[in-house]
Amino acid sequence: MGGAVKAIGQSKRGGGDRSSRPAQLQARENEQKALALWLKGATFEQVAAAGFGIATASGAWRAVRRALVRIPKKEADQAREAQLARLQALRLLLWNHAASDPIKRLRR
């Protein structure tokens, strides 16, 4: 049984025992770090590349979602509002850039 699970909570890929209390605490800490980066405007790819145990952008997305669920509703709502404001500012920037495109103006 080369790829079999060795013990409860131990993955096939050799990730160790993820059900131990220290592993759970480390996972929660990593989720909080992921959330903090995301709140500062990092993409999920950037969060994953930050090097604290999250390997992929989808893993970063899941970590941020788990962290948001664990914080009080008021703080989670503030985090979502901040993200919405960043997205709206980006949309406005892109819209203004598209409207000022010199090639687009020449085609009129």
Image (spheres, grey):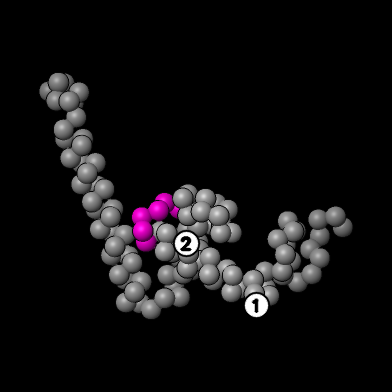
Q: What residue type is labelled 2?
A: Ala
Residue at 50 percent of width and 63 percent of height: 63
Asked if the magenta segment contains residue 43, the reply would be yes
Circle 1: element type: helix
* Extreme residue toward the left, this view: 108
For the residues bearing labels 2 and 1, Cβ distance under 8 angstroms: no
Q: Which amino acid does label 1 sit on?
A: Arg
Considering only vertical position in the picture, is 48 above or below 96? below
**Residue 22 spot, x, y in % from top left:** 64, 75
Q: Name the quarter where the C terminus is drawn.
A: top left
Circle 2: element type: helix
Considering only vertical position in the picture, is 85 above or below 103? below
Q: Any mark on residue 21, and which? A: 1
Q: Mark 2 highlights which residue?
A: 34
**Residue 78 spot, x, y in % from top left:** 30, 70
Q: Is residue 49 left or right of residue 41?
A: right
Asked if the magenta segment contains residue 98, the reply would be no
Q: Name the quarter where the N terminus is drawn.
A: bottom right
Q: How many marks?
A: 2
- Tell me the quarter of the picture where residue 100 sits: top left
Range of residues picked out in magenta: 39-44
* Extreme residue toward the top, this view: 106
Residue 39 in sight here: yes
